[in-house]
Amino acid sequence: MNVAVIGLAFFAMLGMMLVGVPIAVSMAVIGIVGGIAAYGLPFMDSIAPVVWGVQNENLLTSIPLFVLLGELLLRSGVADRMYIALSAWLGRLPGGLLHTNIGSCALFAATSGSSVATAATVGTVALPSLQKRGYSMRASLGSLAAGGTLGILIPPSVNMIVYGSLTNNSIGKLFIAGIIPGLLLTGAFMLWICVQAVSTGSLMREEKVPLAERVRTLVHLVPPLIVFGIVMGSLYFGIATAAESAALGVIAALFFAWQSGKLGVELLRNCFISTARISGMILLIITAAFILNLAISLTGVAEAMTKWVAGLGLSATGLILALIVFYLVLGMFMDVLSMQVATIPVTYPIAVALGVDPIWFGIFIVLMCELGMITPPVGMNLFVVHGIRPDKGGIEDAIWGALPYAAIMIAFTLLLLAFPQIVTWLPSRM
C-alpha cells in the first residue's frame, strides 16, 4: 500500500477528531472505510468477532476496577489528608508547598490510573492554600499540571493497560517497569523546583512542624501506600493477574472508605456512575481501535510502514528520536488515548522490528503521552488545573508554568534511551 495513502488516511482521522467527531467514531469510520475499500463488504463480517473478542477480554476488566479504586480513594477524603501529611514533611524544602504538589501527585498516582484525576484531585486540595500563602500562581499551576502526568507513569495506569492490550504485552511487567522511571521523574521535578527557588531567590518555605507532629501525620499516608503495596506486590510476586490485583485494591479502598466514616449509599452511587462513564468511554475507544487494527493488519499498513522506515536506514536510536518529535507535535493536537490507539498499531511493529524492547517502548509511549498532557493547545492537564484555580487569571499561566517540566520530560526520555536498564531491570527480576 502506498505510504501517501496511509498518510492521507491518518490525517483524515486526525481532521475528524479536530472538528469534534468522537474519537471512537473517527477511528471506526477510517477502519471500516479502509477495510471495505480493500476487501469489499465481506470485511464487515470480520468486525463482529473482533468486537466480541475485545469485550470478552479478561485483561480489560482491570480498567473499570482501577478507575473505581481511584474514585473510592478520591471521594473518601484520602487525598486531603495525604496532602496535609506531605506538606508537614516537604514544606521546609526550597519551594515549599510546590514539593507537596509533586509528592501528593506521585502518591495519589500510585492509587489512581488517571492523569486528569490526579491533577484535579490534588489541585482542588492545594490551590486555595497556595493562593492564601502567596505562592506564584504560574509555578503552582505548572507543578500541578506536570505532577498530574505522573498518574499514567506510576502504576497502576490505565494507559499502560491500553498499550498492553493493543500490543499483547504483560500488564504486570509494564506496571513494574514504570516504578523506577516514575520515582526518578518525581525526583527530577522536585529538583527543578529547588533550583528555580534558589536561582530566583523566592525561597518560599512553610513553618517548621515539630517532629512529633510530623510523625503523627504519617498515619494519613498509610491508606495509599497499603493499596499500592497490595496491587503492585501481588503483581510482582505473581500472586495475582492485573484484574485480580485491581480487585484486591478495590477491597482495600472500600475498607479505608469505611474506616473514614464516609462509606455509604451516596458515595458508592457516585463512584459507580463515574466509573461507568469513564470505563465506557475507554472501552468504546479500545473497541474502535481494534476495528482500525483489523483494517491495518489485513491491508498490510504496518508492513508497508516498516519497509518504508527500514528503507530510510534509521537505527533504533534514530527512530526513537524521530518519534519524540512526532509525538511532541501530535500531542499538541490530540488527547492521550487518541494518540495511543491511533499510532501504536503502526509505530509498535516498526520499533520492535528495529530491536526496541517492547516493555521499554511502552514506557516511552507513556512518557510521550505525559508530554501531550501539558503541551498546548490541547494539553488536558493545563485546562484541568486552570479550571480549578481560585482566581480569574488566563490559561497562559498554566502553559508557561508547565513548560520547564515538558523540557525535563524530554531530557528524561533521552536518559532512558541512553540507559534502558532504568526501565528493564525491575521487570527482569519478576
Image: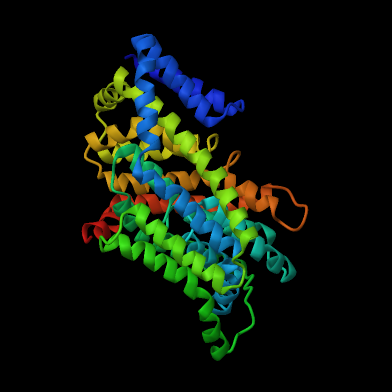
Q: Observer-nearest residue: 252 or 307?
A: 252
Badge count: 0
Image quarter where the C terminus lies is bottom left
Q: Observer-nearest residue: 106 or 46?
A: 46
- Residue 377 as seen in the image, left or right of residue 42: right
Question: Relative to 4, is 294 above or below?
Answer: below
Percent across and percent down for residue 182 are 41, 59
Question: Relative to 294, is 208 above or below?
Answer: below
x 48%, y 34%: residue? 285
Q: Observer-nearest residue: 174 or 44?
A: 44
Percent across and percent down for residue 335 are 53, 39
Q: Give the quadrant of residue 138.
A: bottom right
x 43%, y 66%: residue? 227
x 48%, y 56%: residue? 150
Q: How is the image coloured?
A: rainbow
Q: Residue furthest front?
A: 265
Q: Give the quadrant of residue 246.
A: bottom left
Percent across and percent down for residue 11 are 48, 22
Image quarter where the N terminus lies is top left
Is residue 122 in view?
Answer: no
- Residue 198 as seen in the image, left or right of residue 42: right
Percent across and percent down for residue 371 are 49, 46
- Residue 221 as seen in the image, left or right of residue 268: left
Is residue 58 in view?
Answer: yes
- Residue 296 as seen in the image, left or right of residue 335: left
Question: Relative to 317, is 398 above or below?
Answer: below
x 33%, y 40%: residue? 320
